[in-house]
Amino acid sequence: LGAGEAAALLARLDGVGIAGGSVYDALVGAAALQHGCTLVTRDRRALDTYRRLDVEVELLG
C-alpha cells in the first residue's frame, strides 16, 4: 500500500471494529484488495478481519 492508502485504511479500521494485532492482517488484506487479488491463507483467525474489509479470501486446509 502507498502512504495514502495506508492512512485511509487506518482511519477506517475503528469503524469496522479492527484493532490490535488484527491491524497487521488488515494491511495484508488491503494490499490484496488494492491489487485485485484473492488472498489465500491458512489463518482462520484472520478471516473475520478480511471479511470486514470485503477482501476476497480463500482458506486452505
Image (cartoon, helix red, strand yellow):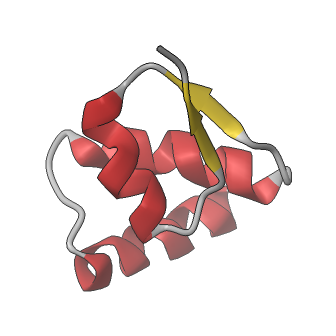
Q: Is residue 1 visible?
A: no
In x, y percent, where is residue 32?
Answer: 70, 45
On the image, the x and y values in percent for residue 26 come to: 43, 51
- x and y percent of residue 58 in the render? 61, 37
Quarter occupied by residue 43: top left
**Above or below, 53 relative to 33:** below
Residue at the spot x=74%, y=42% of the render?
Answer: 38
Query: Quick one: 6 or 33, which is closer to the camera?
Result: 33
Q: Nearer the viewer, residue 50 or 1?
A: 50
Q: Say which residue appears at 20% left-offset and 73% top-offset.
A: 17
Left or right: residue 27 versus residue 35 is: left
Look at the image and tell me whether residue 34 can be seen.
Answer: yes
Going 55% across and 47% down the picture, which residue do you hit? 29
Number of numbered discs overlaid on the protein picture? 0
User: In terms of image quadrants, where is residue 46?
Assistant: top left
Q: Residue furthest top?
A: 61
Residue closest to the far front? 61
Give the residue displayed 33% in from the left and 71% down from the top. Answer: 13
Q: Position of residue 50 (x, y in %)?
A: 46, 53
Image side of residue 39 versus residue 51, left or right: right
Q: Residue furthest right?
A: 36
Depth check: 6 or 20 in front? 20
